[in-house]
Image (tube, rainbow, N blue to C red):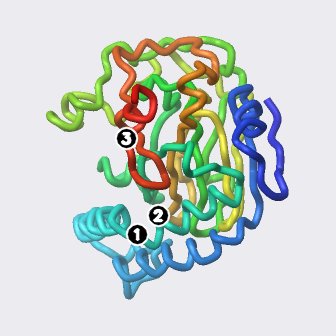
Amino acid sequence: MTTLHVSGPLDDERRGRLVHAGDLLVFPAVPPLAAFCDRAEELIRDALGPHDPTTAQSAMARDDFLAAVTALQRRYREDRTQADLLRSALEYAGVDTDRTCWDHPYLRVLPSTPLDSRRTGGLGAHRDTWSSNVYAQTNWWTPIFPLTAGRTIAFYPAYWASPLANTSAEWDLEVLRAQGRAALPLVPEATEPVDTSAELRVVVAPGDLLCFSGAHLHASVPNATDVTRFSVEVRSVHVDDVTSGRGAPNVDGAAPRVPLEWFARMADATPLPTLVCG
């Protein structure tokens, strides 16, 4: 696995070869992300004001903070400006929006002290493909405020080609949606200890775009700082990768189905199953 800093766009085929082979790609200072971060910060400050959003957790009562974050994340999901700017950022990276599907941009809020809430919880070591079962999946990730190694995303490259026991066979998003977190954890989980000796913590700046395979074992670094982490993530799938069977290797996933309906074409929201099956 190599971490590559990419200046300018990579077309879908070249980028796909690198991502499906396990490389991490960093697109630095992506122009549309400047306005993207400004708009995200506006939404965040509006939700948490008059407090500094990165330290608002300490200034607000727990329930008030959680309520504000819940409202913020709902508003964020509906904000067309954010989606349009993130789409422009992916286009800058070389994504063909007519041949690529995505799910939806998600604003993750990770405070410095765990609040036992789905809205603000970090994710333990997992592969996104344990749940999506789509090995052509690419993940895109960017911070809104500056990061440190104590509040970022971590990768475990030793597991790229090595299996890890997990609960993917028993996990189903539809059950989670219907019954809540009491029925299932937010994502499938490892059932054996993870060797973190080769952990790689990636620190990128606001305006940088991190791109990696959904098959990578990765996790939220437990926030050991006094500053809340705000980051945005989205997942994409190229139609041609699905139809041709291209993607990362499956070394330990056992998801019971392939929910292609999670993804829709970036250009016009046509569902991925329609594009694949006609």
Q: Which residue is mark 1?
A: 80
**x and y, in percent, of residue 94 in the image:** 71, 52
Which SS class for mark 1? helix
- The answer to whether 146 is drawn above or below residue 154 in the figure is below
Residue sitting farthest toward the front: 278
Identify the mark nearer the N-term, 2 or 3. Answer: 2
Q: What is the distance, in whole Å, between disc 1 and disc 3 at their CAs?
A: 19 Å
| Amino acid on which the number 3 mark rests in the picture | Pro
Q: What's the residue at 71%, 47% (across, down)?
A: 202
Contact (CB < 8 A) between labels 2 and 1?
A: yes
**x and y, in percent, of residue 82 in the image:** 47, 68
Which SS class for mark 3? loop
Is residue 226 or residue 104 the one in the foreground? Answer: 104
**x and y, in percent, of residue 193 in the image:** 54, 18
Q: What is the distance, in whole Å, between disc 2 and disc 1 at their CAs?
A: 5 Å
Quarter of the picture containing the C terminus is top left
Q: Give the label on residue 271, or none.
A: 3
Identify the mark nearer the N-term, 1 or 3. Answer: 1
- The answer to whether 100 is drawn above or below residue 162 in the figure is below
Q: Which residue is mark 2?
A: 83
Closer to the eye: label 1 or 3: 3
| Amino acid on which the number 2 mark rests in the picture | Ala
Which SS class for mark 2? helix
Closer to the eye: label 2 or 3: 3
Q: Is residue 73 left or right of residue 52?
A: left
